[in-house]
Amino acid sequence: MSEQPVDEVVMVPNPYLAALRDKRTESLPPLYELRTALDDAVSAMDQGAWHSTTADGFYAELTGQLTTLTGVRDNVVAPSMTPWRGCRRWSSRARGTPGGTAW
């Protein structure tokens, strides 16, 4: 009885994953800088730095921007690596395709 061929798993460089990691790393410092600045502005407004109807509108916009930025951080930047996990393996034989390749 002949043995079944075994899929050989080889780790190969993934330039897309590397680029994604680089861009993610580059995007974090400005994101946190902006978050800190908005937090400071909200804190100043909470402590009564400005009172008027214009200030009320400004405060509403400011907190809206802070909410949007938090959403970007939580929903875009943080999980941006998830789709790329598991994409680093390459099989020398695709199932059902003798001699085929599969990612």
Image (cartoon, helix red, strand yellow):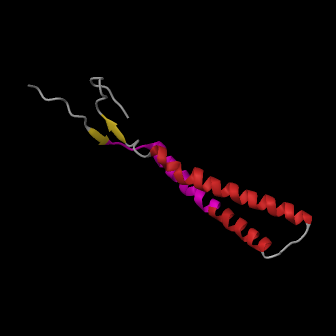
Where the N terminus falls, by quadrant? top left
Q: Residue at 28% across / 40% down in the picture? A: 9
Pick whichever, 28 or 69, lies toward us.
69
Above or below 84: residue 28: below
Q: Is residue 86 magenta?
A: no
What is the total number of numbered labels drawn onto the structure image?
A: 0
- Residue 97 appears at what percent x and percent y? 30, 23
Residue found at x 76% / y 69%: 41
On-image quarter of the C terminus: top left
Q: Position of residue 24 (x, y in %)?
A: 55, 53
Above or below, comparing residue 103 to residue 29 in the picture: above
Classify residue 87 as left or right of residue 61: left
39 shown above or below 95: below
Depth check: give the residue in front, 16 or 79: 79
Q: Which range of residues does the magenta coloring cover?
A: 11-31
Residue at 43% across, 46% down:
85
Quarter assignment of residue 59: bottom right
Q: Position of residue 87 (x, y in %)?
A: 41, 41
**Which residue is found at the position 70% from the left and 68% from the top?**
39
Q: Position of residue 17 (x, y in %)?
A: 46, 46
Query: Is 14 on the left or on the right of 32, as rendered?
Result: left
Q: Among all residues in the image, which is located at the extreme top?
A: 97
Q: Is residue 18 magenta?
A: yes
Identify the main secondary structure in magenta: helix
Quarter holding residue 71: bottom right
